[in-house]
Image: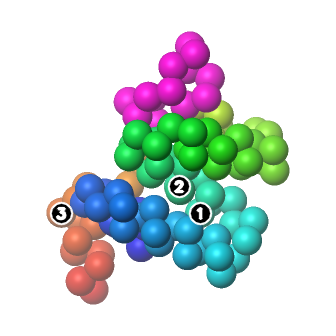
Amino acid sequence: MGLVLRAIGALGEAIKAYRKALELSPGFVAAELNLGISLLLAERVDEALFCLESVLKRDPHNGEAASPLTSGGRLVPADLPVHVPAPSRAWDEVKQ
């Protein structure tokens, strides 16, 4: 659900969805990674760093978490790996 929300630009709702997923399943690495990416896209850098660094502590070889942290000292949304369907496809998936 969080990926779909992020894909359609509903970052606040995506962040809530990832936080709920982590509440229900603490330590869910994919949810924390996607929360960090969503926070970064929402320009909530300090929170994003906390999430991404937490992912790397548990999964040091996670390239998706490391990518925005190691991009020449910059932490910007353009450096993020993007693995979400196009918004129109995302909406089609939700409707099914």
Q: Considering only vertical position in the picture, is 33 above or below 91?
A: above
Circle 3 — which element?
A: helix
Q: Are marks 1 and 2 in contact (CB under 8 Å)?
A: yes
Mark 3 or 2: the one toward you: 2
Circle 2 — which element?
A: helix
Q: Position of residue 10 (x, y in %)?
A: 29, 61
**Alpha carbon of mark 1 to alpha carbon of mark 2: how far?**
5 Å
Locate residue 28: give its quadrant.
bottom right
Mark 1 or 3: the one toward you: 1
Say which amino acid is labelled 2: Asn
Say which amino acid is labelled 1: Ala
Q: Which mark is residue 88?
A: 3
Q: Which mark is residue 34?
A: 2
Locate residue 85: give its quadrant.
bottom left
Q: Decide if residue 62 is in sight here.
A: no
Crowdedness of circle 1 by 10 Å Cα count: few (<14), some, many (20+)?
Answer: many
Say which amino acid is labelled 3: Ser
Q: Residue at x 65, y 81 (%)?
A: 24
Mark 1 or mark 3, earlier in chain: 1
Circle 1 — which element?
A: helix
- Magenta residue span: 68-80
Q: Magenta includes 90?
A: no
Q: Which mark is residue 31?
A: 1
Crowdedness of circle 2 by 10 Å Cα count: few (<14), some, many (20+)?
Answer: many
